Image (cartoon, coloured by chain):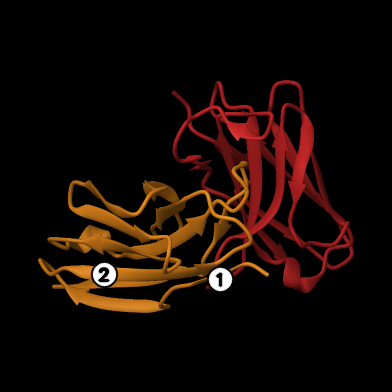
Chain colours: A red, B orange
Amino acid sequence: EAGVTQSPTHLIKTRGQQATLRCSPISGHTSVYWYQQALGLGLQFLLWYDEGEERNRGNFPPRFSGRQFPNYSSELNVNALELEDSALYLCASSLGQDGGLPLYSGANVLTFGAGSRLTVL
Amino acid sequence: GQSLEQPSEVTAVEGAIVQINCTYQTSGFYGLSWYQQHDGGAPTFLSYNALDGLEETGRFSSFLSRSDSYGYLLLQELQMKDSASYFCAVNPSNTGKLIFGQGTTLQVKP
């Protein structure tokens, strides 16, 4: 079974440009999460999508946006890139939510992809 | 606000036991998880505690005290391959979103 796949692996952009990152979740997973991991820092929650809807958003400016497609894959867009956007962007997937309650009783286990390294020059 | 505190670095020798602590302050609490991330790799799930007490999975154990807003990850019989970053994470809202700590870098020496 394929894991969570992300593309591209590396991306180099300049200030002011736009970046698009892509994520394919594990088959059967309907929830997709995006996290930003700046060098030496923890994982900062960006966005959560479930069943095509944005369910929650972290403390990031509106130039960070995304969407989830009918096949549950997802895209993260970062507009007007700034130098501090340079980071590893991690996508994770999990079983879906139903009325806010995890379908999986117990831990909401996230399965992460290997990430997309974005460098802004 | 919501915050999780864990030590930034821990060093131990092969075969030893190490404990990584995590204290949290969140608006809600539905469980504490631990993830391992090797350099350049994806974080991977290690363990989860929703109730007070100790959960054991092989060489790794995780403990939770909800009254103290505290948990720890215990790694026994350390191996070189255990050198990695370890993150605690809280589920504050019984939904998909997890809040992660800053991570503890564990260095295992021969």
Q: Secondary structure at mark 1?
A: loop
Horizontal placement of A96 versus A71: left or right?
A: left
Where residue B4 sits: x, y (%)?
52, 69
Which dot, 2 or 1, sits closer to the camera?
A: 2
Where B30 sits versus A117, above or below?
above
Residue name at image x 40 percent, y 55 percent: B34
Q: Quick check: A22 left or right of B83? A: right
Q: Residue furthest front?
A: B67
Q: Is disc 1 on the same chain as disc 2? A: no
Identify the residue at image location x=77%, y=29%.
A52
Q: Which residue type does callout 1 highlight? A: Leu
Instruction: Give the CA distance from mark 2 to mark 1.
Output: 20 Å
Q: Is residue A100 above or below residue B92?
A: above
Location of mark 2 (residue)? B19
Contact (Cβ within 8 Å) of mark 2 with mark 1? no
Q: Nearer the viewer, residue A43 or A117?
A: A43
Q: The numbered mark 1 sits on a residue in which chain?
A: A
Q: Residue at x 51, y 42 (%)?
A: A110
In front of the other: A55 or B92: B92
Q: Residue at image x 48%, y 32%? A: A3
